[in-house]
């Protein structure tokens, strides 16, 4: 009982912290925000979990809106052994319901680089599209104040690298599509905090449409989510693996509490 009590207190404190934070800041779309921590180890961009703990140094797993099961994680570094000139931001997206290689599949990340908001993409907004499964499918756009315009200022290998594969992972043993992405934020003129939209599409499940975080238009930055860059690695007690454990304990404690209340009402 003492162990459960300690865990419950930890969860309660975390919840109070989250509520306090929610009262101070507001996301572009309510409920879509997260802290963006520095990576402990630089991910290897090979389209899979290279090691079981490669992507555990993030605050949490983010579920995309839509009928299919798609999640992403992200972190960043001040410098990189890969030779990027600025600070690289790393993404991994896992499409659990997709294990087919279709020419029309695509991944997309939209950045409001300086969180300037707006009803149309402007000069600090960048959209990265990766259609299909090889380098030729990369197209990068920058806003001009009214729409997206193709730009060649951001190039493969220098500022962006994307690799995907059909692989299993520590979070799902069934082979599925995984993409790893690195974007040099200095070259996309990004500030420390950004608004983002992340999306994925499986041509084999075209009836499900685009899966996105948040469910929004890629043309309206006002509808996207918010990230805050944290100038430190995630505290050891808040790693993704620990957060999963605490969530499980929270559900267990909550269900036991409800059962006790139910029994008292029956007496």
Image (cartoon, rainbow, N blue to C red):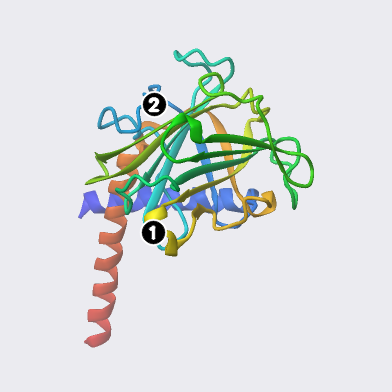
Q: Is residue 149 left or right of residue 87?
A: right
Q: For this rendering, which residue is in front, 229 or 96?
A: 96
Q: Residue furthest right?
A: 145
Q: Is residue 59 above or below residue 266?
A: above
Q: Is residue 180 above or below residue 7?
A: above
Instruction: State the quadrant of the C terminus.
Output: bottom left
Q: Earlier in the sequence, mark 2 or mark 1?
A: 2
User: Cα distance, mark 2 to mark 1?
Assistant: 26 Å
Residue ID at (41%, 52%):
202
Secondary structure of the residue carrying numbered label 1: helix
Residue ID at (53%, 16%):
84
Residue ID at (49%, 56%):
210
Secondary structure of the residue carrying numbered label 2: loop
Q: Is residue 92 left or right of residue 175?
A: right
User: Residue 51 falls in which quadrant of the image?
Assistant: top left
Q: For this rendering, which residue is in front, 123 or 137?
A: 137
Q: Which mark is residue 18?
A: none
Q: For this rendering, which residue is in front, 203 or 178?
A: 203
Residue ID at (43%, 26%):
39
Place of residue 124 in the rendered image (x, y in percent of width and height, measured from the top left): 72, 35
Q: Which residue is mark 2?
A: 45
Q: Which residue is mark 1?
A: 205
Q: For this rendering, which residue is in front, 205 or 187?
A: 205
């Amino acid at each position: 009982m003492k162990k459960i009590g300690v865990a419950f207190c930890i969860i309660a404190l975390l919840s109070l912290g989250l509520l306090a934070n929610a009262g101070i800041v507001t996301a572009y779309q309510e409920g879509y925000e997260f802290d963006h921590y520095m990576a402990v180890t630089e991910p290897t961009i090979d389209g899979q979990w290279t090691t079981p703990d490669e992507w555990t140094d993030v605050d949490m797993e983010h579920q995309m809106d839509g009928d299919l099961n798609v999640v992403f994680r992200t972190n960043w570094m001040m410098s990189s052994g890969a030779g990027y000139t600025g600070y690289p931001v790393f993404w991994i997206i896992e499409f659990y319901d997709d294990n087919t290689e279709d020419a029309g599949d695509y991944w997309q990340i939209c950045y409001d680089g300086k969180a300037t908001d707006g009803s149309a993409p402007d000069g600090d907004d960048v959209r990265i599209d990766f259609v299909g499964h090889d380098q030729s499918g990369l197209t990068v756009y920058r806003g001009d104040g009214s729409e997206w315009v193709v730009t060649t200022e951001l190039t493969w290998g220098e500022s962006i690298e994307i690799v995907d594969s059909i692989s299993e992972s520590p979070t799902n043993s069934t082979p599925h599509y995984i993409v790893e992405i690195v974007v040099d934020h200095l070259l996309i003129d990004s500030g420390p905090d950004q608004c983002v939209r992340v999306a994925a599409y499986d041509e084999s499940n075209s009836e499900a449409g685009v899966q996105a975080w948040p469910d929004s238009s890629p043309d309206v930055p006002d509808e996207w989510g918010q990230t805050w860059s944290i100038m430190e690695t995630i505290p050891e007690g808040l790693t993704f693996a620990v957060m999963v454990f605490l969530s499980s304990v929270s559900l267990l404690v909550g269900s036991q509490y409800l059962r006790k209340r139910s029994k008292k009402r029956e007496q």
